[in-house]
Amino acid sequence: MSLIQSLKLVLAPPHPAARPFLLASGAGAVIGRLLPWRVTKLLGTASGLFFGFCLYFFRDPERVTPAEANVAVAPADGHIVSIEKVAPPPELDMGDTPVWRIATFLSVLDVHVNRMPVAGTVTRVSYHAGQFLNASLDKASELNERNALRLTLKDGRQLAVVQIAGLIARRILCDAEEGMQYETGERFGLIRFGSRTDLYLPADVAPLVEVGQTMIGGETVMARL
């Protein structure tokens, strides 16, 4: 990645979900520095640092989705922590036949905007309350708080995307609703702060990526459909 590309990534405008955090921390920074007491100045400095962190964490860079048709792209930035065959989430009613699940872990330094891996229709959205274990652990897919989406492709096949909260994350944002249609790479949600995103491929599709590989949400091809 070139220096210019790196700067564009770091300086990308924030996702709308950042607004309340930026307003609160920005106001705290200004007020804290204006008041004469030492404790308020310390609070103002802390607020300023948090403002900078939010600008970085919520950055939402534009992505170039592959022009190739019939591919599934990464639904999130991060690195792959596991690839294995498991049954789809039971709440999505996709049967119990094992399919390939690709788990991508997002650290607090990754872009946290989630993107649709394929073009299709959202036919099920299911939220499940749970724990906040380290999202890199395999059991996080079953025990952690999560939000699961079932997508139906034009040919009738189905796949799933699951947003999973992590050790620090305490909030899953999802704009997708049942019946909504999306194109490949479109934004549909965000998880803060540190999380995991699982992709369940159709039964007849195998992954093209490997454990440890770094993903770029909306761009990296994970499988051919």
Image (spheres, grey):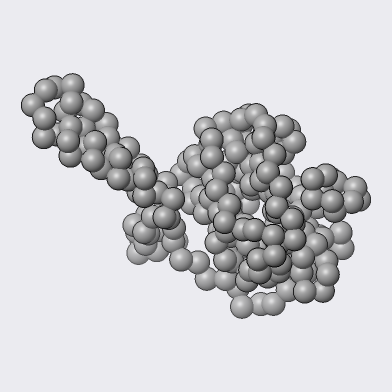
> Quadrant location of residue 203?
bottom right
Is residue 118 in view?
A: no
**Which quarter of the rendering shows the N terminus?**
bottom left
Which residue is found at the position 52% from the left and 32% from the top? 168
Q: Is residue 29 left or right of residue 217?
A: left
Which residue is found at the position 60% from the left and 38% from the top? 165
Q: Residue furthest left?
A: 36
Is residue 112 in view?
A: yes
> Quadrant location of residue 164?
top right
Count of numbered badges drawn on the protein: 0
Position of 102 relative to 187 (above/below): above
Q: Position of residue 105 (x, y in %)?
A: 61, 43
Q: Position of residue 108 (x, y in %)?
A: 48, 41
Q: Position of residue 123 (x, y in %)?
A: 75, 61
Position of 103 relative to 183 (above/below): above
**Which quarter of the rendering shows the C terminus?**
bottom right
Q: Is residue 20 left or right of residue 147?
A: left
Which residue is found at the position 11% from the left and 34% from the top? 34
